[in-house]
Amino acid sequence: MKHVSMRQAGLRGLIGVCHAALAWGPSRILGLLVSLAMALAMTATARAHPIDTLQPGQWYRVPNSKLTSVAAQNVPGSFGGIMGAWSGGAFDTTRNRLIIWGGGHGDYAGNEIYAFDVASLTWVRLTDPSTNVGGDANSGYYPDGKPRSFHTYEYIEYVPSIDRFCSFGNSAGYPGVNSTSNIDCFNFSTLQWEPRRGNLPAGAWGTPGTAAAYDSTTGHAFVLGMQSSSIVAEFNPSTNTSTVRSNPSYVGYYVTAEIDPTRRKLVAIGSGQQFMWDISGTGKVNATGLSTSGNTGVVGAPAPGLAYDPVSDRLVAWAGGADVYTLNLDTRVWTRHPPAAGNSVIPTAAAGTGTYGRFRYVPAYNAFIVVNSVSDDVYIYKLTAGAGQPLPPSAPPPVPDTTPPSVSLSAPTSGATISGAAVTISANASDNIGVAYVQFMVNGQNLGAADTATPYSVAWNTTQGRERVVHALSRRQRCRRKSNHLIVDHRYRVQSS
Ligand SMILES: [Ca+2]
């Protein structure tokens, strides 16, 4: 009689489930790259962007790009005040949009935000104006809790480090001339103003004409007050705290502020003034009068456009017409750049109240953008050759992990009698985010390497091992969640002779 012994062995399928970080395993990444390459190719052939063919020194007038086309209706005051009433703009480098927000005083009550989308060359109204424009003007807010309408001068900036559009203090809140030290930021994802992030120190607010600039090195914003006791404040958006960074000095109205990140200088220029602060260190620094030569005419303009160009490593100024000016902070020389031969587009005159932040650099296209009034078109200018730095493709939104993973041993069936040196064990595994791997185990020991791709299987040499020999058929299935692994046990009756 043939001797038959039975061993009982628990076979375990261990499934590793991708939570977030592991969700993009090698196979998933490959698929993403393929589809991205196809999308880019299709875009290039289907629709060229006018900026793509703009040559250095050329201007482009965007057809039908007057902000009036999307203006809010039935708002007290004149819509033109949103730019013309000493108001500026900012540039959202994440979404490639020029942001317009302003008005205030007796000019315009609307606190709605507009964006000019560079990719589609169209305006969009991101929010609607508050309907109740009463309340306490000293608070800086309308009764609905949203910031009032203000002369925004040059104190509004997009802050990439927190992906927010922020107002650093404010002036001339509708309908009066009230100023506040409020630091309010707007979230483009939720299209909501957030709770106040803090308040500026004295000297950085309270007078018209305040200017601000974003520092790409620190991710902080620098804010420059006006008049006799003006100071520079540095705002850290990760702690919502402001630090006084300069001793008080006199800075008159109508300047625009920008940071040269290469030389670590905060520069303010306009109405004949030129100031500079060294922001490379910490602590308080004094304003330095900036003595320049060359084509300095643009300095006399009220709050001219001023934006740093990373390609030429220059500050670029504009104050109407087709000429553009660059400042080399090493030599302190201004250079005038007349339009290129063949350029036929001349932008409209700058607003007499100032251009402020409505002249901006567009990194994605290596170009500049400006808008002068609600009834003027948008203009785009190319200073240097070369394409821009395309926006990074948006990361796919994280998938909520709401479904527990599941795994089962599909063959042989649990409780089956198996034998031999190469029994194929197969498993099924699934999860709403992704399955990282399936690890087979025998009595707690790994059986082969983790299987990272379907079909999940392993060859089991049942003639080896030290499993306990039993003579009764047994079957046990256990399932439990252990961290992000799901473990399923099957028991098999192993027959050997
Ligand atoms: Ca600025």
Image (spheres, rainbow, N blue to C red):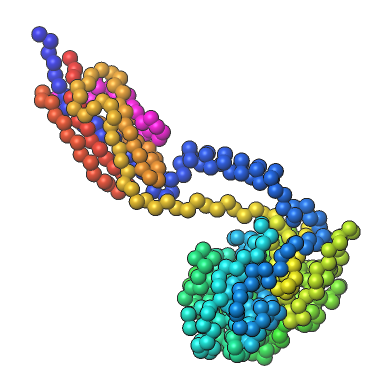
The vertical placement of 238 against 30, above or below, is: below
Q: Please name the residue shown 60% across and 60% down the image.
A: 95
Q: Please name the residue shown 12% across and 10% down the image.
A: 2
Can the viewer see residue 97 in this picture? yes
- Closest to the observer, 59 or 494: 59
Query: Most extreme residue toward the front, as rendered?
Result: 74
The percent coordinates of residue 8 (x first, y second) are: 17, 27
Query: Most extreme residue toward the right, as rendered?
Result: 341
Q: Which segment is the magenta one? A: 450-469
Q: Please name the residue shown 66% across and 42% down the image.
A: 41
The percent coordinates of residue 163 (x first, y second) are: 55, 65
Q: Please name the residue shown 28% across and 27% down the image.
A: 411
The vertical placement of 418 against 299, above or below, is: above
Q: Is residue 464 magenta?
A: yes
The vertical placement of 11 against 182, above or below, is: above
Name the quarter where the N terminus is drawn: top left
Locate residue 40: give its quadrant.
top right
Locate residue 296: give its quadrant.
bottom right
Q: In this view, does 29 lie to the left or right of 57?
A: left
Name the quarter where the C terminus is drawn: top left
The percent coordinates of residue 414 (x first, y second) are: 21, 29
Can the viewer see residue 249 in this picture? no
Locate residue 14: give its quadrant.
top left
Q: Is residue 328 magenta?
A: no
